[in-house]
Amino acid sequence: MGDVAMVASILYEFQQQHPDTEIIMVSRKLFEAFFTHIPRLVFHPIDPTGRHRGALGLLRLFTELKKYKPDFIADLHNNIRSRILGSFFKLSGVKLCTLHKGRSEKKALTRSYNKVKYQLKLTTERYADVLRALGFDIQLSHKLEKTDRSVPKELAIDFSTTKKSIGIAPFAQHAFKVLPLEKMTEVIAYLSKNNYATYIFGGGSNEQEIADNWAKSYPNVKNLINQFSVSQELDIIANLDLMLSMDSSGMHMASLVGTRCISIWGATHPYAGFLGYGQSQKDIIQVEHANRPSSVYGNKPCDCDGTEAIDLVTSQMVIEHIKNICE
């Protein structure tokens, strides 16, 4: 989800610099909300578990996309499905360029011995490189651009008040990227006590129950998990003063609407190139250790002298960073 949000940030700037182009964006229907603000972009949903499943499904998708008569194909995913689809277009004579993921560099960064630690190329620049290889010049600003979006009426909140508003995306797909709940609870308790308006984003039914308990236990805390569409969540995030997120999609959604985000990193590391577009290195919270990172996506434990990497981060570190920005 975060990767797709980063693509949207790049395509927005690309269309600003190339007013004579039309883009056909192919992705899951869930992510369409990321692209509605981009001019001259047509969103074509893919259904990988249904209509477009398997080889025959990809052939069906190829037939659908061929009707657009594309001049170029930019494979910004580089997985088996996108490579097969790209090969169909290449065989039909359409110029194709594919994302270079830098797998060898990332392997050297995340291996358990003789790590090679330095800042790798940002993923957003890797996306832009595909467009450049197709013959298009694009210069990325790497700056946040605040967007003007209306708050959903269902939220019934006026963000024009003087109370500081903070969104928190405290969960992630992998546990090794999630700040322990007791520490996040301490952060939320501080925000509640100091009259911050706090909104919890992102998760499934289990996370929703946790967030419900926070909302019941602490004044000024609202649980928004599974309450709004992705588009409405973006509307809300655009009106926040600050976002707090793990290395997860919450950070990238904040970038899409130009909201500053504090990001917390454990088993993963910004060196891999996945910091939110336009977000500042100064807003990264992490504890450096020779064993970090263990993986690019946070799906492996990261033992730092007997302590999981994310456990090195304290609630006070997070609170102090928020205070430095908002108080």
Image: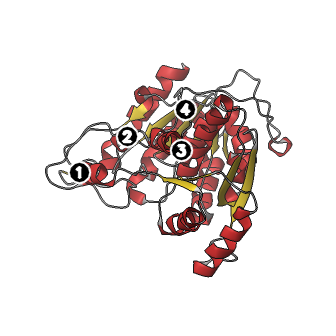
Residue contact at pointers 1 and 4, CB within 8 angstroms: no
Measure how far apart labels 1 and 2 are at the Cα level. Answer: 14 Å
* Marker disc for residue 270: 2
Q: Residue at x 52, y 35 (%)?
A: 277
Q: Nearer the viewer, mark 1 or mark 2?
A: 1
Is residue 227 at least partly visible in the picture?
A: no
Give x and y (percent) for residue 172.
49, 55
Q: Residue at x 23, y 51 (%)?
A: 108
Callout 4 amino acid: Asp
Give x and y (percent) for residue 36.
75, 44
Task: Compare residues 158 and 300 and report the one nearer the observer.
Answer: 300
Task: Give the residue at mark 4.
Answer: 137
* Marker disc for residue 134: 3
Is residue 188 at least partly visible in the picture?
A: yes
Q: Furthest-right residue in view?
A: 153
- Residue 306 shown left or right of residue 28 in the figure: left
